[in-house]
Image (cartoon, helix red, strand yellow):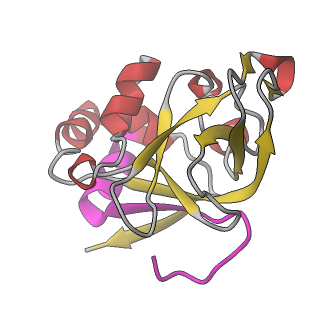
Amino acid sequence: MSEAHTAGARVLYLSASQRSKIIGAVHGDADAAAAFDSTLMSDPVRLFVEVLSTKRVPAHSGVSYGHTYVTQHPTTLARVAIGYGHGIPRKAGNSVSVTWSPAEGPPIRLPIVGRVAMDEFVVDAGDAPVLPGSRVCVFGDPRRGEVSLGEWAESLGESPVSLAACLDGRVVRSVSE
């Protein structure tokens, strides 16, 4: 990721072909929507978002609005700079995971815990050394060990193209040829 660092950065990496399919789907082209979904394994889209802060909490700590998630043991929580105001479905809370890649070793899945807020969500990082300023992959390339957009969509009962198309203009698109 070579883009300039900006606090709360949100970047969607996709090919020109996938971008074209999303635009077609938004304008009602059912064939473009189907083509987007069917090519995700060979042409994945990847959404990376910055971690805003982390906090070590004790067992029995409630997370986010309404405390719909309560920690079972001491853990580290990380605030991630994207929420329903950017197009992440509210129902992603307590339902899906993101991926964090340490400097060495395989990617680690971190569950989204608590409710998705307007501009952020929280992940349970456990004992992983996630730090503010690092990036999580919200969805990406399963060949790299990342949670795929298809997996996200299936977990939420949505189509992959609808999840990608709903991301607002504050999510930067990085289009490759």
User: Would residue 59 be found to the left or right of residue 30 on screen?
Assistant: right
Q: Position of residue 71 (x, y in %)?
A: 71, 24
Is residue 38 rendered to the left or right of residue 120?
left
Asked whether 19 falls inside the magenta stretch, the response is yes
Name the residue nearer the viewer: 45 or 26: 45
Residue 124: name its quadrant.
Answer: top right
The residue nearer to you, when weighing 13 against 123, is 123
Residue 28 seen: no
Picture layout, residue 74 above or below residue 128: above
- Residue 129 visible within the image: yes
Which residues lie in the magenta part?
1-25
* Residue 177 higher or lower than 84, as above or below: below
- Please indicate whether residue 35 sits to the left or right of residue 46 in the image: left
| Residue at screen point 23% across, 44% down | 40
Number of residue marks:
0
Residue 131 lies, with reference to residue 159, above or below; the image says below
Name the foreground residue: 122 vs 125. Answer: 125
| x 57%, y 27%: residue | 92
In the rendered structure, does residue 115 fall within the stretch colored magenta? Answer: no
- Residue at image point 74% right, 70% down: 7
User: In which quarter of the view is residue 64 placed?
Assistant: top right
Give coordinates of residue 54: x percent, y percent. Answer: 75, 52
The quadrant of the image that shows the N terminus is bottom left
- Residue 12: horizontal and vertical position, in percent? 47, 59
Residue shown at 39% from the left, 55% from the top: 46
Q: Report x, y in % for residue 154.
A: 35, 22
